[in-house]
Image (cartoon, rainbow, N blue to C red):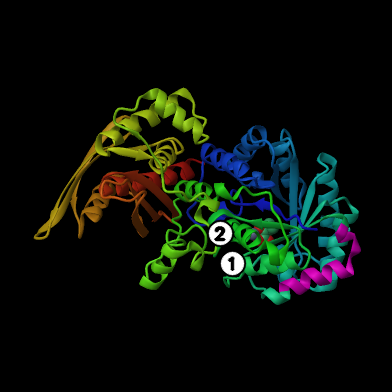
Amino acid sequence: MSQVFIFDTTLRDGEQSPGISLNARQKLEIAEQLARLGVDVIEAGFPITSKGDFEAVKTIAEKVKRPSIAALARAVDVDIDRAWEAIKNAEKPRIHTFIATSDIHIERKLKKTRDEVLKMTEAAVKRAKKYTFDVEFSPEDATRSEFEFLCKVIRVAIENGATVINIPDTVGYALPDEFGKLIKDLKEKMPELNEVILSVHCHNDLGLAVANSLEAIINGANQVECTINGLGERAGNASLEEIVMILDTRYRSLGKKTNIKTEEIMRTSKLVSSLTGYHVQFNKAIVGANAFAHSSGIHTDGMLKDRTTYEIIDPVKIGLTSSKLVLGKTSGRHGFRRRLEDLGYVLSEKEFERAFKRFKDLADKKAQITDDDIEAIVADEIYTLEEIFKLVHFEVVCGSDIKPKATVKIEKNGEIFKEQATGDGPVDAAFNAVNKIVGLKIKLLSFSISAVTGGTEALGESNLQLEVEGLTVSGHGVSTDIIEASLRAYLSALNKVIDKIKK
Ligand code: KIV
Ligand code: ZN
């Protein structure tokens, strides 16, 4: 079989990364982009975990067409019923149910016996099957499970109607040759696996998630579970863009195809990065800022003579074109609306007006506005959470011989609060002023600032992570002023805390 199905779990396993908390509007936007990217399945969430997640999965199931929409459920009735309730209106609904099969999980986590796990598998798959034809079953921690017992559980799942069997390397422990052999042994031992889709789900604790997924594909797996930018629990999941581009670039050696429109990869990566606040490392394969940058003299010389001397992928193939200069100060509503439509955004009138105002403010400061700028504005302005803390005004005084001092005004529930503070730099001073206003215990865990496009007048983009009252949250903000971008990121993270506390 030459087809490999791409199951994207950015909105479920990816969202389990510490600090990520997407609202329903943000999740819908990512799901729509994943559909444009051409993924076969979107795992939209884990509906039993919260009302917010349930609503987001439901909205995606109702609105996003073409891919199957999967919802995760433990192997218990309440989870399965709730998952179905969320996805029942999808064009192609899939229930994904799981239970752990390693002794360490069965005994210490579930406090059950192997027999009970077998019974729960049977009951869960049967229950899910009453709702929908398409049922995926995962034996959690498969790579640390005893092989014979693993086969028994999988057999029970298939006998009761599972259409997809997913083998997770839950803790990212397997080595590529071991994982490949596991897939091969399962297929040899169980011919019934040829009648279902055989999937893999690899975590990246040892940096082997992509290598393990590839080895599984070589040995007969025909679905891969992965995430954009490799997001996911702990060290993350296998990265979608890496798997897809390996299969594409090495097609002649591997002979495997996917349905992914590779030209959408870069845009999807950027959208996920700005909405989650998880910055992509510069040297990340495929989507990192340096993935196509050549700096040494020998390399640039070779590139100028023939691109293929040092480039194995044409950057255009992943949608990395030099950002188009599209709009400017004189562009009006009509031009802006047209560009948004061309980029695939569907905004309500209210959202359009907010984006247009932000665009006009930017056009006053920056002569030429690119698609990258527009994408950054929309991500920052439209898909942010309802703002409890709103930045009204700030001033910073700093220089080589003075202690940086900031004044910040914030609106909260219609009331304006103003504070002043000093710090060891202008950003620190501004954050200290905010801290005085909000009165929460805040620790800055990470902070970065980068430019959305080139040039000194580029939009600055700030990503950060905070620990607030025991919660880890990420924030993202853009502005032509880097202090403002940092403050926006800081407040967006604080707004997430308030949102989480409310839930
Ligand atoms: O890592 C894992 O085992 C999972 C399962 C729910 C598939 O995420
Ligand atoms: Zn996982």
* Residue 183 forms part of the magenta stretch: yes
Q: Is residue 449 left or right of residue 200?
A: left
Task: Name the spot of residue 208 as percent of width and height, x first.
Answer: 61, 70
The amino acid beneath tag 1 is Asn
Picture residue at 62% right of the left edge, 34% below the top: 59
| Label 1 residue SS | loop
Q: Is residue 395 left or right of residue 317?
A: left
**In front: 40, or 107?**
40
Task: Name the spot of residue 84 as percent of width and height, x first.
Answer: 74, 40
Q: Quadrant of residue 80?
A: top right
Residue at which label 1 appears: 204
Task: Name the spot of residue 106 as percent of width and height, x first.
Answer: 74, 66
Crowding near the residue tagged with mark 2, few <14, some 14–19, many ≥20 C-alpha atoms within 10 Å: many
Separation (CA) of disc 2 from disc 1? 8 Å
Q: Mark 2–mark 1 contact, CB under 8 Å?
A: yes
Q: Quadrant of residue 159?
A: bottom right
Q: Quadrant of residue 220?
A: bottom right
Q: Earlier in the sequence, mark 2 or mark 1?
A: 1
Crowding near the residue tagged with mark 1, few <14, some 14–19, many ≥20 C-alpha atoms within 10 Å: many
Image quarter of the N terminus: bottom right
Residue stretch in magenta: 179-194
Using the image, tell me which numbered label, if any, was put on residue 230.
2
Picture residue at 47% right of the left edge, 63% below the top: 306
Task: Name the spot of residue 50 as percent of width and height, x first.
Answer: 60, 44
Q: Magenta stretch mostly in which secondary structure?
A: helix
Using the image, tell me which numbered label, if any, was put on residue 172.
none
Whether residue 141 is visible here, answered yes or no, is no
* Residue 369 forms part of the magenta stretch: no
Ligand 2 quadrant assignment: bottom right
